[in-house]
Image (cartoon, helix red, strand yellow):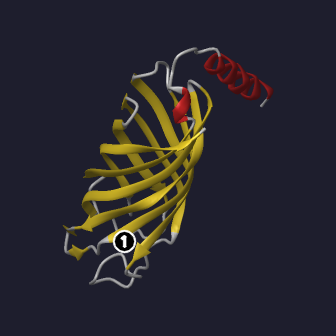
């Protein structure tokens, strides 16, 4: 555990040393965006599309943190006689971003809890109840400039074995792309 703490501290210090990541007038910002992708694995859903809202503070020019939420809609699909229902995910998450340069490549993730919404049953022709939510993660890699972020991302809510029907595992995950616009809130 001490090794993990030391590694995190060293990464934080290294990030602090990065000189030119974001302009000074973009210390606090609201990020409004959209995402779309394919459900993975595609057993109970085929695709996903959603909106994202986040607040970010640049603690240093190269490191941002904040809070993130939004809504992603998963489109249910027929699978081996099961008519899987649509459902949604509403995350409540911490946002972490690393910006090596003022514009260009960045890395980030959102970590928190994802609430699953929609019909109580996983499928319209089954009595098995869907999970209410679970641990949420959304790692992403992308390109940024002062106004825009473009990213490839993976979104996942870990539900354990809740919502499984026979051989079909319940999945609330998607691989896709996202875009967001940065609205500066001042220093």
The image shows residue 32, relative to residue 169, as above or below, that is: above
The image shows residue 52, relative to residue 147, as above or below, that is: below
- Disc 1 marks which residue? 165
The image shows residue 78, relative to residue 184, as above or below, that is: below
Residue occupying image coordinates x 64% and y 16%: 14
Which element is circle 1 on?
loop
22 relative to 118 in the view: left or right? right
- The percent position of residue 65, horizontal first and vertical second, equals 60, 40
Q: Quadrant of residue 122?
A: bottom left
- The percent position of residue 183, horizontal first and vertical second, equals 44, 45
Residue 74, visible in the rendered structure: yes
Q: Quadrant of residue 16?
A: top right
Q: Quadrant of residue 186?
A: top right
**Residue in front for this viewpoint, 141 or 29:** 29
**Residue in front for this viewpoint, 167 or 6:** 6
Which image quarter is the N terminus in? Answer: top right
**Residue in front for this viewpoint, 19 or 172:** 19
Count of marks overlaid on the render: 1
- The percent position of residue 3, horizontal first and vertical second, equals 75, 23
Q: Neighbour class for label 1 at 10 Å: few (<14), some, many (≥20)?
A: some
Residue occupying image coordinates x 35% and y 37%: 148
**Residue in front for this viewpoint, 26 or 127:** 26
128 relative to 98 in the view: left or right? left
- The percent position of residue 181, horizontal first and vertical second, equals 37, 44
Residue occupying image coordinates x 28% and y 58%: 49
Residue 169, visible in the rendered structure: no
């Amino acid at each position: 555990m001490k090794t993990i703490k030391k590694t995190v501290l060293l990464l934080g210090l290294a990030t602090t040393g990065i000189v030119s990541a974001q302009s000074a007038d973009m210390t606090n910002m609201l990020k409004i965006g959209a995402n779309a992708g394919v459900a993975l694995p595609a057993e109970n859903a085929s695709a996903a599309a959603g909106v994202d809202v986040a607040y970010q503070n640049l603690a240093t020019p190269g490191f941002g943190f904040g809070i993130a939420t939004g809504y992603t809609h998963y489109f249910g699909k027929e699978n081996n006689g099961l008519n899987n229902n649509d459902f949604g995910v509403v995350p409540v998450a911490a946002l972490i971003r690393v910006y090596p340069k003022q514009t260009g490549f960045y890395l980030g993730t959102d970590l928190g809890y994802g609430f699953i919404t929609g019909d109580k049953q996983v499928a319209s022709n089954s009595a098995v109840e869907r999970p209410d939510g679970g641990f949420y993660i959304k790692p992403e890699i992308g390109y940024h400039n002062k106004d825009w972020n473009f990213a490839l991302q993976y979104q996942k809510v870990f539900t354990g074995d809740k919502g499984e029907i026979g051989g079909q595992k319940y999945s609330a995950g998607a691989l896709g792309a996202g875009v967001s616009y940065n609205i500066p809130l001042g220093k």
